[in-house]
Amino acid sequence: MFRRALAAVAASALVLILVGLPAQELEAQTAFGFQGNWGSEADFGVGGRLLVNIPNVNLEAVASADVFFPDGDVDWLEFNGNVFYHFHMPDAPNMLPYLGGGLNVTRLSFNGSSTETGLNLGGGVRFLRPGLTPFIEARAVISDADQFVITVGLLFGPTAFN
């Protein structure tokens, strides 16, 4: 019950942020990419990501989907929707660190199936390069399917935002 209330509060906050922005700030830039993951409970995984920048407010919405390959006869899928605040570092203009959180939905199949909803808290760094942008990220998943996840990947498209 508490987790559902927390998820509703997080989703409401995102809607309020987006509704409160002037129309010109909603002209977003997008990037997409591929990623590899290591999860403390789910072992190795692979997935994809879509990043939508909201200009002039240092916010971006990131959606990702991952399939993990844990030991045994278990299917582990994760779907994530996060909002990150990115920081500009004048002394290191090719690095873009970010922090934030969002929602996690984990689908587990092992002698039946279950779906767990929880929260993500984490951050990472993008290394800005023309064409391809590598990134590394760490996040904690807080749910009945708790785990710590480290993700590395490549993004295609604009990732150096205002």
Image (cartoon, rainbow, N blue to C red):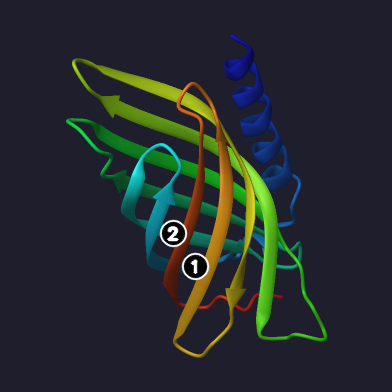
The reply, left or right, for residue 68 in relation to residue 96 is: left
Q: Please tell me which residue lies in front, 28 or 42.
A: 42
Relative vertical location of residue 158 with respect to residue 34 in this rendering, above or below: below
- Which quadrant of the figure contains the C terminus? bottom right
- Seen at 43% across and 32% down, the residue is 105
Determine whether the residue tagged by mark 2 lies in a helix, strand or loop: strand
Q: Is residue 11 left or right of residue 108?
A: right
The outermost residue toward the bottom is 130
Image quarter of residue 108: top left
Q: Residue at x 53, y 88 (%)?
A: 129
Residue 57 is drawn in which quadrant? bottom right
Q: Secondary structure at mark 1?
A: strand
Choose top left, top right, bottom left or bottom right for residue 5.
Answer: top right
Residue denoted by label 2: 50
Q: Are marks 2 and 1 in contact (CB under 8 Å)?
A: yes
Q: Please rate how many residues cluster around mark 1, counting C-alpha atoms within 10 Å: few if below 14, some from 14 to 19, many from 20.
A: some
Q: CA distance from mark 2 to mark 1?
A: 7 Å
The three-letter amino acid code for the residue at tag 1 is Thr
Is the residue 128 above or below the residue 143 in the image? Answer: below
Q: Position of residue 35 (x, y in %)?
A: 38, 62
* Residue indicated by mark 1: 30
Establish if 78 lies above or below 49.
Answer: above
Residue 80, position as x, y percentages in the image: 47, 42
Type of the residue with mark 2: Leu
In which quadrant will I find the N terminus? top right
For marks 2 and 1 on the same chain, the one whose residue lies earlier in the sequence: 1
Q: Position of residue 103 (x, y in %)?
A: 54, 35
Q: Image check: 65 left or right of 24?
A: left
